[in-house]
Image (cartoon, rainbow, N blue to C red):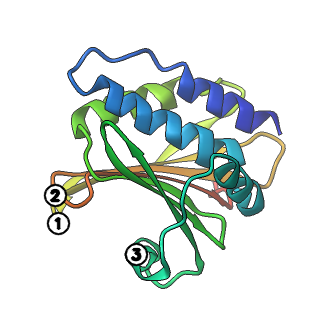
Amino acid sequence: MKFFALVALSMLSVGSVQAAESAATMYFIKLYSATCLKSGANVLKLREILQAQRLPKVTEHEAAPFLKGNPGVVWAATAPFGTYAIVSRDDGLCAVIAQKADAKELDTVFSSFIERIPEKLPYKVVKTSDEVRDRAHYRSYQVDTPNDSTAFHIALTTSDQESIQAMATYARTTPSAP
């Protein structure tokens, strides 16, 4: 479907950011684009992508906190900027999780990405929350695709906690009523 290619291209075309952690932010965004967005919420395609990248799977015990009781697989990625987990749940949800991230910068880059989704792919903000609950900020978008009964849920959660500071998710969903 053209949608996946356009979304991934939009994500990768986000201009570089000038802050000190720009490389870390762009690595996170590119990892999210190359895995979650590229797979289009197709579990088998995502797992093929991750196997082709030769990323190591984590043990069931290490995966448990990321899967939260849902069946799936978790891979690990390391970069000079930190450690990342790529979650592939059997229900199609994909997530990229960063141990370290600049929340403000990621929020800016993600917002820029949403603004670049082409007009023929209408989107709407499903939920925007600035409330701090467990020191986390959650922003999510539903992207409705034209002439299709499918929508996509894209979310970014950021936190100032030391264990996990960012999580971007992508999942297929049903469009909400207008």
Mark 3 and mark 1: Cα distance apart in space: 22 Å
Percent across and percent down for residue 154 are 52, 49
Q: Is residue 174 left or right of residue 16?
A: right
Q: Residue at x 16, y 51 (%)?
A: 160
Nearest to N terminus: mark 1 or mark 2? 1
Q: Nearer the viewer, residue 80 or 174?
A: 80
Which residue is the site of mark 1?
134
What residue lies at 82% left-to-right and 48% top-to-bottom?
A: 148
Please state which of the two labelled residues, at mark 3 or mark 1, is closer to the viewer. Answer: 3
Find the distance from the CA under tag 3 to the CA under tag 2.
Answer: 19 Å
Q: Secondary structure at mark 2?
A: loop
Which of the marked residues, 3 or 2, is nearer the chain's N terminus? 3
Q: Secondary structure at mark 3?
A: helix
Q: CA distance from mark 1 to mark 2?
A: 9 Å
Q: Nearer the viewer, mark 1 or mark 2?
A: 2
Label 3: few (<14), some (14–19) or many (≥20) C-alpha neighbours in 10 Å: few
Please state the total of marks drawn on the protein image.
3
Disc number lying in front (3 or 2): 3
Q: Quadrant of residue 21?
A: top left
- Kindly identify the amino acid type of the residue bearing the numbered disc 2: Gln
10 over 62 or under it: above or below: above
Left or right: 61, with 33 as reference point: left
Asked if labels 2 and 3 touch by Cβ distance under 8 angstroms, the answer is: no
- In the image, 34 versus 114, the foreground residue is 34
User: Which amino acid lies under the numbered mark 1 shown in the image of this protein?
Assistant: Asp
Q: Residues within 10 Å of mark 1 (few under 14, many from 20)?
A: few
The residue under label 3 is which amino acid type? Glu
Report x, y in % for residue 112: 43, 25
Task: Report x, y in % for residue 139.
Answer: 37, 48
The residue at which mark 2 appears reads as: 161
